[in-house]
Amino acid sequence: MNVASPQLDQLSRFSNQTWMAGDFGEIAKYAAKEGENFVARLALKPGQRVLDVACGTGNTAIPAARTGVEVIGVDIAPNLLEQARQRAAAEKSVCEI
């Protein structure tokens, strides 16, 4: 049962199109270090589970996976998820995106 209003559906489509336009992955590279800094402040421990909502290109999910936690990343933009998957695979991160 879909209870979303037509306006919410339209907003969702617009949001998806916005995040898929251009190459946000290039812009995200400038914030990668801050993702690492954020994860460092969390004091994650191996075996914990983390859900990264709006994970984008993995700037938080991948550093979190490096700490030994189980990470699942989700995002509205398939192109950003694909970039995150490629980054995680290149590092052999234990990160499900």
Image (cartoon, rainbow, N blue to C red):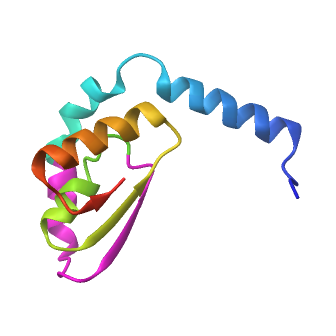
Is 91 situated above or below 8?
below
Q: Position of residue 33 (x, y in %)?
A: 13, 45
Is 64 situated above or below 86?
below
Report if residue 41 lies within the magenta region: yes
Give the extent of the magenta segment.
34-55
Q: Nearer the viewer, residue 72 or 63?
A: 72
**The N terminus - image quarter:** bottom right
Left or right, 8 with reference to 50: right
**At 21% across and 59% down in the image, what residue appears?**
38
Q: Residue furthest top?
A: 22
**At 58% across and 24% down in the image, what residue appears?**
17
Is 57 situated above or below 38?
above
Answer with the quarter of the image where residue 32 lies. Answer: top left
Q: Position of residue 28 (x, y in %)?
A: 27, 33
Is 19 situated above or below 52?
above
Q: Nearer the viewer, residue 87 or 23?
A: 87
Q: Position of residue 41 (x, y in %)?
A: 18, 68
Report if residue 31 lies within the magenta region: no
**At 23% across and 83% down in the image, what residue appears?**
47
Instruction: State the count of labels.
Output: 0
Q: Position of residue 15 (x, y in %)?
A: 60, 32
Q: Nearer the viewer, residue 3 or 34?
A: 3
Q: Nearer the viewer, residue 90 or 59?
A: 90
**At 30% across and 35% down in the image, what residue appears?**
83
